[in-house]
Image: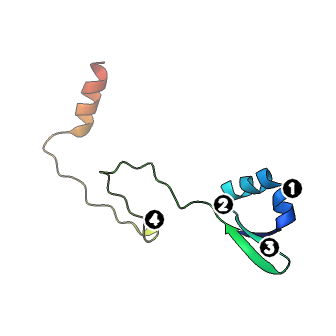
Amino acid sequence: MRKDVTVQEMQEHFAERLEDVRRGVTLRVIDGDQTVAEIWPPAFESNTPEDMIWRRARGRFCDFIPPPPIEADVDVVALIREDRDAR
């Protein structure tokens, strides 16, 4: 989203305009009919650890095909119930 503001409005309502930027609005500061500056939010900052592989999802979730079930020699449900009963 982009919003045009005059230099005078920017001076008078600086804190409010910065709050707009924090919410994701790009400001275009105009003096007369000339653009003086553009202020936009910083790029996406991730809190992801450096060693974690991360990539943006592609496609739609409804198109996801899960892998086949794992063939196990033990009854997984029985193991879970045994573990819960032991607590």
- Would you call the spot at circle 1 few (<14 residues within 10 Å), some (14-19), or many (20 or more)? few
Amino acid carrying label 2: it is Gly
Amino acid carrying label 4: it is Phe
Query: Of label 1 and label 2, which has the lower sequence position?
Result: 1
| Disc marking residue 12 | 1
- Would you call the spot at circle 4 few (<14 residues within 10 Å), some (14-19), or many (20 or more)? few
| Disc marking residue 24 | 2
Q: In this view, does 14 lie to the left or right of 54?
A: right
Spatial separation of the CA atoms under disc 2 and disc 3: 19 Å
Q: Which one is in front in this view, the residue at disc 2 or the one at disc 3? A: 3
Query: Of label 1 and label 4, which has the lower sequence position?
Result: 1
The x, y position of residue 59, in whole percent, is: 44, 71
The residue pinned by badge 4 equals 61
User: What kind of colouring is applied to the model shown?
Assistant: rainbow
Residue 23 seen by the camera: no
The residue pinned by badge 3 equals 30
Query: Of label 3 and label 4, which has the lower sequence position?
Result: 3
User: Number of numbered discs present?
Assistant: 4
